[in-house]
Every structure is written in structure tokens, then in C-alpha cells.
């Protein structure tokens, strides 16, 4: 497999992304162009949220089972 990946310019990171987010189809996983674009938009949204979390120094969510109790900023760490 490593030789084929190298010949086709496919990285191990690409393989892992397809396995994690692709659509199973019998013995293979498929992440097509449209799905990849949709996933990229979703990740860009995650990036915005993660940057806000980083600015807050992290966020903690307290839960008991399925019930969300409270949430608070972790504060900055230097």
C-alpha cells in the first residue's frame, strides 16, 4: 500500500481523513470532491470556534450523564 500511496501522491494523513470521514461502500471508504468541500467548510467553522476557545484559555463544561450543568472559562495559562 505504501508504494501505491507514494505513486499516487496520497499521504497517510489523507488516508486517515478518508477513513474517519468518508462514506463506507462495501469494502472501501469514499470521500468525494463535494463531500470534501462540505467537510472543509465544517472544519473552517470548527477553526473559528476553536480560536475563540483558545482566546478564553479553554472552556470547561460540567455534565452529569446527558444533563449539562454549567460551563466556564478555564482562564489563561502562561
Image (cartoon, rainbow, N blue to C red):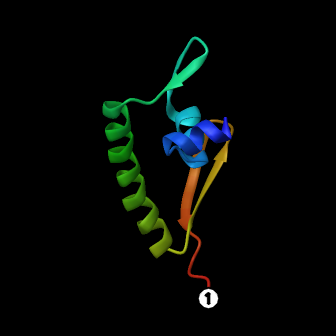
Q: Residues within 10 Å of mark 1 (few under 14, many from 20)?
A: few
Q: Nearer the viewer, residue 71 or 36?
A: 36
**Residue 48, percent across and down?**
37, 61
In percent of the image, x 32 and y 40: which residue is there? 37
Residue 65 as seen in the image, left or right of residue 73? right
Dividing the image into 4 quarters, which one contains the N terminus?
Answer: top right
**Residue 56, percent across and down?**
48, 73
Dividing the image into 4 quarters, which one contains the C terminus?
Answer: bottom right
Q: Nearer the viewer, residue 1 or 70?
A: 1
Is residue 72 depicted above or below 42 in this figure?
below
**Residue 54, percent across and down?**
49, 71
Quarter holding residue 73: bottom right
SS category of the residue bearing label 1? loop
Is residue 62 depicted above or below 35 in this figure?
below
Residue 32 as seen in the image, left or right of residue 3? left
> Circle 1 is placed at which residue position?
78
Quarter holding residue 6: top right
Is residue 68 depicted above or below 57 in this figure?
above
In percent of the image, x 61 and y 46: which residue is there? 12
In percent of the image, x 52 and y 43: which residue is there? 10
**Residue 68, percent across and down?**
57, 45
Q: Nearer the viewer, residue 62 or 39?
A: 39
Is residue 59 depicted above or below 55 in this figure?
above
Amino acid at each position: 500500500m505504501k508504494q501505491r500511496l507514494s505513486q499516487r501522491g496520497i499521504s497517510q494523513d489523507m488516508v486517515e481523513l478518508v477513513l474517519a470521514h468518508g462514506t463506507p461502500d462495501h469494502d472501501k471508504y469514499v470521500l468525494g470532491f463535494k463531500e470534501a468541500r462540505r467537510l472543509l467548510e465544517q472544519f473552517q467553522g470548527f477553526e473559528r470556534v476553536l480560536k475563540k476557545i483558545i482566546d478564553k484559555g479553554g472552556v470547561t463544561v460540567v455534565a452529569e450523564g446527558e444533563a449539562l450543568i454549567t460551563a466556564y472559562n478555564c482562564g489563561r495559562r502562561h
